[in-house]
């Protein structure tokens, strides 16, 4: 059986359709992979923001503690440099 031009044309169109279908299905696979990656990136972004907030809170607490220590150090120095009191009795 000989292939006519019409048969060759149909075979080419069928081949193109198969390639196009496979190409589109590959794109859908990549879309799923990108969606998964984006989801993981969103989770990481949320964790990073939470960690940044925790770090900022810890930093503020540390600054407050340092201020209290500075106040206490000042008071201790005043007590150490004050003249000694003579005990009564």
Image: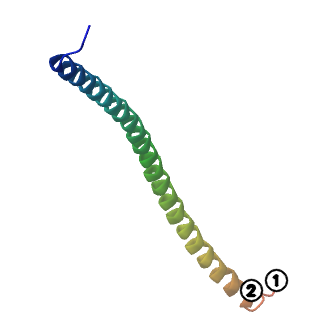
Residue at position x 37%, y 35% in the image: 30
Residue at position x 44%, y 40% in the image: 40
Q: Earlier in the sequence, mark 2 or mark 1?
A: 2
Q: Position of residue 12 (x, y in %)?
A: 23, 24
Instruction: Determine crowd level at label 2: few under 14, some 14-19, many 20+ residues with C-alpha closer than 10 A.
Output: few
In the image, taking residue 25 as reference, residue 9 lies left or right, namely left
Q: Is residue 12 above or below residue 76?
A: above
Q: Residue furthest right?
A: 89
- Please tell me in which quadrant of the rendered image residue 88 appears: bottom right
Residue 11 has which mark?
none
- Please tell me in which quadrant of the rendered image residue 32 appears: top left
Q: Residue furthest top?
A: 1
Determine whether the residue tagged by mark 2 lies in a helix, strand or loop.
helix
Determine whether the residue tagged by mark 1 lies in a helix, strand or loop.
loop
Q: Quadrant of the C terminus?
A: bottom right
Residue 87 has which mark?
1
Question: So how many labels did they put on this image?
Answer: 2
- Please tell me in which quadrant of the rendered image residue 11 appears: top left
- Pointer 2 residue: 80
Q: Position of residue 36 (x, y in %)?
A: 41, 35
Q: Is residue 13 above or below residue 38?
A: above
**Disc 2 + disc 1, Cβ < 8 Å:** no
Q: For this rendering, which residue is in front, 61 or 39?
A: 39
Residue at position x 28%, y 22% in the image: 18
Instruction: Determine crowd level at label 1: few under 14, some 14-19, many 20+ residues with C-alpha closer than 10 A.
Output: few
Q: Quadrant of the N terminus?
A: top left
């Amino acid at each position: 059986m000989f292939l006519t031009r019409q048969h060759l044309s149909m075979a080419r169109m069928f081949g193109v359709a198969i390639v196009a279908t496979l190409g589109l299905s590959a794109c859908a696979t990549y879309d799923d992979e990108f969606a998964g990656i984006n989801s993981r990136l969103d989770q990481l972004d949320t964790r990073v923001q939470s960690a940044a907030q925790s770090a900022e809170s810890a930093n503020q607490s540390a600054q407050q503690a340092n201020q209290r220590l500075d106040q206490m150090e000042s008071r201790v120095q005043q007590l150490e440099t004050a003249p000694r009191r003579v005990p009564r009795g």
